[in-house]
Image: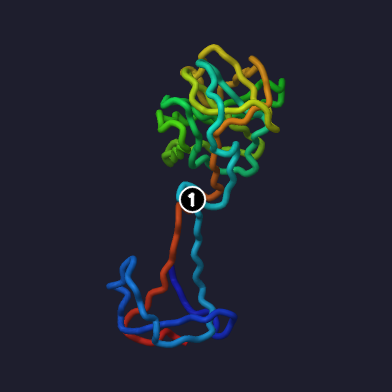
Amino acid sequence: MKIHVVNGGGSYKVRWVGGNLHAGLAATQNVNINGGVQQREYSIEATVTSDPTVTGDGCATGWPIVNRRGPDSNGWTMASPDQKFTCSGQVTAWKYQGKFSRPFRAIVFRPTGGAVTEFEIVGINDIPAGAVNTPVNYVVPESDRITVAIGDVIGWSFGGGVITYNGGGSYKVRWVGGNLHAGLAATQNVNINGGVQQREYSIEATVTSDPTVTGNTLILIRYCCGHKPRT
């Protein structure tokens, strides 16, 4: 990245110190930046996220990850038609809380536009067994990330119940039994017509609209050669 002075002046102070320190700087080191100070504007910017699994601009779709009463019994495929993605991009992480350490399949569904129970599978992430009674954050490998569109919805499928839930709440959850989870595949249509209730599950999908920006980014201005920064 090329860094240069845009203008002198502006609203912000910039301090500097010479002496070719840049090569020896290290984390946790204290530095006395006492060479001078001026009002300046530089063409540099740092992008920061508070969660290193969240990449770029995006959205999260799902419920708060807290301890709930569930889980479900065995052998169900679930979809929440009310938990819609509000941005397009890629699913970079799934967060959940489980009562049992079991694998399950996290799914992005797309309503077909036909019956309200009919969904197309956009993509599936196989989530390995994780810790119990505590939030789990599964970071999706880059090669496995599902590309979602606005209006897609979250779902999941399992042989053995995992995710905690409570009855009630503001969102509908649909389900169908029959232990379908192992045979589900992307682009397949599924009729989730076994039942519907208002429920809240501890599962959430994180989506980024820019997969090239990852984690916490900090940019450090460095000067060389012992000279005063260019004016």
Towards the viewer: 189 or 34: 34
Q: Residue at x 33, y 66 (%)?
A: 27
Is residue 159 shown left or right of residue 171?
left
Q: Which residue is mark 1?
A: 51
Q: Residue at x 51, y 73 (%)?
A: 43
Q: Residues within 10 Å of mark 1 (few under 14, many from 20)?
A: few
Residue 155 position in % (x across, y down): 57, 28
Residue 56 position in % (x across, y down): 53, 52
Secondary structure under badge 1? loop
- Give the answer, above or below, for where 66 lies relative to 73: below
Q: Quadrant of the N terminus?
A: bottom left
Picture colour scheme: rainbow
Towards the viewer: 79 or 171: 171
Residue 145 position in % (x across, y down): 48, 38
Residue 128 position in % (x across, y down): 40, 29
Q: Which quarter of the picture shows residue 216?
A: bottom left
Is residue 187 shown left or right of residue 221?
right
Q: Residue at x 43, y 66 (%)?
A: 219
Amino acid at circle 1: Asp
Q: Residue at x 58, y 30 (%)?
A: 201
- Give the answer, above or below, for where 216 lies relative to 62: below
Extreme residue toward the top, this view = 178
Q: Which quarter of the picture shows residue 76?
A: top right
- Give the answer, above or below, for where 86 lies relative to 153: below
